[in-house]
Image (cartoon, helix red, strand yellow):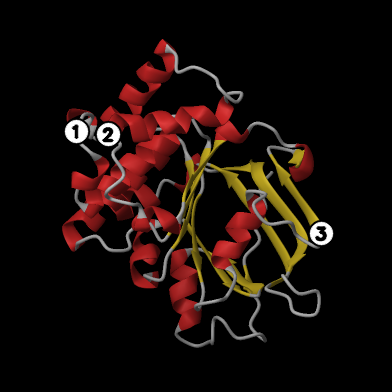
Amino acid sequence: MANKLNNELNKVDHTKNIIEIKDVSFGYDRNKDILKSINLEIHKGDYIGFVGPNGSGKTTLIKVILGLLEFREGSIKIFNQDLKNFKDWNKIGYVSQRMANFDNNFPLTVEEVVLMGRYSGKKLGGRITDEDRKLTQESLREVEMWDYRDSLIGDLSGGQMQRVFIARALASKPEIIFLDEPTTGIDEKSENDFYQLLQELNKKMGITLVIVSHDIERLTREVMHIVCINQTLTCHTTPEEFIKESQTSNMFGEDVKIITHHKHN
């Protein structure tokens, strides 16, 4: 199923950039860059996998895009707005690595966890509305977790929990979702089901997806494009080209610049 869906590249609109990153550098210490001169465009409808060695800057780049870390040089635009002026954060979903370490003893039901995804667009102290509850129900049904709405989050399996966190991201009706190592700690069947869900979100709902994972072999079977990061952006290409190049090159070496630029009229 994944391979068939991956062939539908014509659904990606390469004329519409959701994210535009130009010459972005970041470091906690001005004398040591974690990210250096990153240039990247993320198009509407794409499904991108971020890969790279430990400490290469993959998660850091996501946090910079989301405004959680302040970059030192360059520029970032989100939906054609400069990052510092961007306010429509409900358009962006984020499932972080920390979700895997969620406190299972915290007394929240599945429905309450997903309702938390509706708070991003509210003022402090804003009330939950009927619309919020309707969108929460829709999101849980989308990930096939509505029947578990009254269950405590800590009573779920790892795969079920990840579906709930996806539903929480979906509750804000996002156009793009970032996922950081979302399959950590779940079994093979749950992982297969999870990736099938991502394909459906991308193809059926048209949501742009960016996923960070160490499982490069799996990503090459799932995503439309691979982005290699090792302080700099060393590769932006299709899974097929990535596999071909990785057989003859050190994909994460500083001297490798295998970048495919997509040009469309």
Residue 204 visible to the viewer: no
How many tags in the picture?
A: 3
At 35% from the left and 71% from the top, the residue drawn is 217
Q: Secondary structure at mark 3?
A: strand
Q: Earlier in the sequence, mark 1 or mark 2?
A: 2
**Amino acid marked by disc 2:** Thr
Alpha carbon distance from label 1 to label 2: 9 Å
User: Quadrant of residue 233 in the image?
Assistant: bottom right
Q: Secondary structure at mark 2?
A: loop
Alpha carbon distance from label 3 to label 1: 45 Å
Mark nearer the viewer, 1 or 2 = 2
Depth order, front residue of 181/16: 181
Q: Which residue is mark 2?
A: 109
- Compared to residue 34, the image places residue 44 above or below, namely above
Q: Which residue is mark 3?
A: 74
Q: Badge 2, how many Cα within 10 Å: few under 14, some, many 20+?
A: some
Labels 2 and 3 touching (C-beta < 8 A): no
User: Quadrant of residue 219 in the image?
Assistant: bottom left
Mark nearer the viewer, 3 or 1 = 1
Q: Which residue is mark 1?
A: 148
**Amino acid marked by disc 1:** Tyr
